[in-house]
Amino acid sequence: MLDVRDLQIVRAIHAEGSMARAARVLQVGQPALSRSLAALEARLRGPLFDRNRRGMVATDLGRAVLAEGAEILERLERLDRHLAEVRGAQVQTLTVAAGSYVIESFLMAAAARMLAAYPTVQVRLLAANWSEVPRAVREREASIGIMDLGNLDDAEDLVVEPLSTHPGIFVVRPGHPLLALPEIALSQILAWPFVLIGRTPRRVQAPLAAAREAARAAGALHPAFPALVHESPTVALGALPHSDAVAAVTVPVAAQALAAGALVALPWRAPWVALHSGIIRPRHRRATEAEEALLDLVRSADAEALAVARAMLAAAGISDAVEASSR
């Protein structure tokens, strides 16, 4: 007799076409999955998949299991959703893993709006380095991940939804020596103490390294890079009024300090200084009602944050597109 796990195994292998990818979806090791499939085929007295250059292709027996199993799994998933609704008075937990720039740019606003709409849902935000977000989703530590998609590699087992590209800026304290320059180059910015997150996104590494070399050649360079490391850009901004440090942030993170005049945005931008935000979710898992509601709020907050950023950049005379100066 087949059980639910057997049906889930057959569905995952068929959908992924690969034992390795199916193992990731099912959160098991590939050797364990191979043993489970072999045991299932032995019980059914026939192969469920042919192994060829195209990957794992269902046999007639496999297609029969898939056809009947799809309805069974759909009914069970529907039952789970119904039971969750019956238990509606009980508090549910919705866990989202996200990079700190995402959380502080727009995700916190979306999560706060859930409080009134879904009082029986506890939203947990796992602030993580961008490299940890896909792992948290794949290992079911979080049902939703929101991150910089420019850093996402293998995503065949995930549903990926791009959001906005949020412009980033360099900010300093009022009266910083850089503000007295008639024109600012990136090499001059990188000569000062820099505040950054612990793991730099790949697309920014080469420009930063080149600017640091140019600053070194000019004989003006703060030795440590980054000079100050913190995973929260909002917290890191607290260092700027007390030093000549420079921080790279999205506009919403610094919006309040910029509006109050406590910080100043440097008039320099390049297209790679940006947050390419997006949502990732497990491919073979239907979102709950609360998750769908949060995602709608995330999309709205994302669009609002981008509108605010563009308005503030326009008011400051800073382009939110390609900046001519990229030295």
Image (spheres, rainbow, N blue to C red):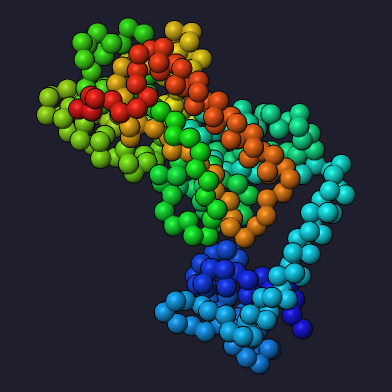
- Residue 2 higher or lower than 311, as above or below: below
Relative depth, front residue between 67 and 267: 67
Q: Is residue 206 left or right of residue 40?
A: left
- Residue at position x 61%, y 27% in the image: 109
Q: Residue at x 51, y 38 (%)?
A: 163
Position of residue 195 measured from the top left corner of the image (x, y, whole percent): 37, 27
Decide: is 225 above or below 97. Answer: above
- Residue 22 point in image, percent of width and height: 55, 68
Residue at (77, 83) in percent of width and height: 1
Quadrant the C terminus occupies: top left
| Quadrant hosting residue 115 | top right
Residue 274 in the figure: left or right of residue 158: left
What residue is drawn where x is 30% and y is 28%?
A: 322
Count how many numbered circles sit on residues in the image: 0
User: Where is residue 165, by image quadrant?
Assistant: top left
Q: Position of residue 27 (x, y in %)?
A: 59, 64
